[in-house]
Amino acid sequence: MKFLKLIYGYVIILVRGENLERFLNLCKSRKVYMERIRYREDGQLMAQMQAADFFRLRPLRNKTGVHIQIIQRRGMPFFFLRNKKRKAFFTGMILGGILIFFLTGRIWNIHIEGNIRNSTGEILDFLDKQDINHGMSKKKINCSEVAAAVRKNFPEITWVSARIEGTRLILNIQEGIIPPKINSNTSPCNLLADKDGVITDMIVRRGIPVKKPGDSCKKGELLVSGELHIMNDSQEVLRKEYVHADADIFISRQISYYQEFPLKYRTEIPAGKKKKEMYFRFGHWYLGLYPTLHTGQKRITEEIPLRITENFILPVWIGWTETTDYTVKEETYTRKEAEKEAVRRFHQYEKKLLQNGIKISENHITTRLTESLCITGGTLLIIEQTGEKSRIT
């Protein structure tokens, strides 16, 4: 309601005279609407009304003999009337309206949802190759063709819905369930040991086990045979059949561990206050404070690209740098610190083994200090999977 008042314009009037009540009654009978009516201390009447209704007050004023004065004029009609000589202002408004009309006819945001296996960047790159990008005209986009092209290029996508809402192109994607890969290699084979060790566990799914848990094995030795003997009632071999041997076999074996590091090390100590600067980057050009990094200084830089929408990124970055002065000091590990550092390095080594599917069951390592080194060495008993396929010919 208030917005409509600003569009059509309204005035605040001051009425004075002896027949104020008769003036109000006549306004009511002639359906001249006023609001915010109030009497002032000096007996004058103040009210607010639409600009169009103000011109209907003349006959009522003549009948009652009151005097009407306009105190304030508000709304767009009066705004344009006051600024009618400002041609540049109105020209700017018209050009701004044309620009807004032009921009609303283009796509400024490509929104993709429902994708998991195919990243948003990959789909946007594909759309860009199809000449579908930010800033293009909405009239040039055929939603059904866009959906068909995306579905054809990405086999994992089973359903695509493309629609335009305002200045947004929205792609709803549904990806199908990819069945697990089935090992199609069914050629007959045996399983051989690829390392020396002692078998700790064996789960045979197909084939005849030749070894059992607790047995030792040598590299190249047969563990599971793919040759099956079909017997008769007299336990005589009628025929032989060959299968693709399949089993999970774990062995334990011993490996050596050695690690050393110097007792003296260098540490960086902050000196002075941190200096923060902000800058802008346009491609390879920098604008703002970005001083040269000198010796004895460290810098942390963070950049954020400016974007109009979630996927429409401008080639402009705003960045912050934090420069800290530091001094280098040489220190020496104490025995306790050196042992703690040795344990930390061993845990890192153990983590790498676990990532490769190898577990340490026992460790027999010791740590000793020389004048300049901390040396950790010994043996580890590890458990890992074995089983190398050997084709039966």
Image (spheres, rainbow, N blue to C red):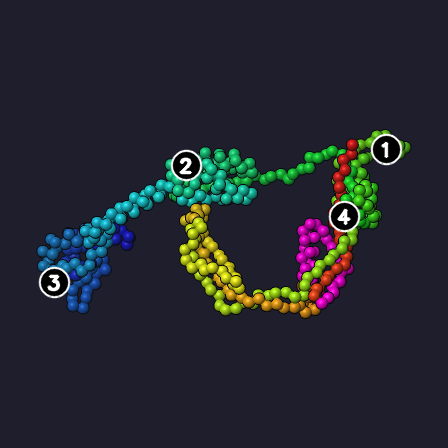
Q: Amino acid at mark 4?
A: Phe
354 drawn magenta: yes
Q: Which residues are magenta?
A: 342-371
Of 169 and 159, nearer the camera is 169
> Distance of mark 1 from mark 4, alpha carbons?
31 Å
Of the numbered discs in the image, which one, if any, rests on residue 141?
2
Q: Earlier in the sequence, mark 2 or mark 4?
A: 2
98 or 2, which lies in front? 98
Q: Position of residue 133 (x, y in %)?
A: 43, 41
The answer to which quarter of the image holds residue 223 is top right
Kindly identify the amino acid type of the residue bearing the numbered disc 2.
Ile
SS for dot 4: strand
Residue that numbered label 1 is attached to? 231
- In three-dimensional space, the C-alpha distance between marks 3 and 1, rounded to whole angstroms, equals 128 Å
Q: Is residue 137 visible?
A: yes
Tell me which residue sits at (44%, 37%) in the image. 131
Q: Quadrant of the C terminus?
A: top right
The residue tagged 4 is 250
- Precedes in sequence: disc 4 or disc 3: 3
Q: Quadrant of residue 19?
A: bottom left
Element at badge 1? strand
Precedes in sequence: disc 1 or disc 4: 1
Is disc 2 placed on a helix, strand or loop?
A: loop
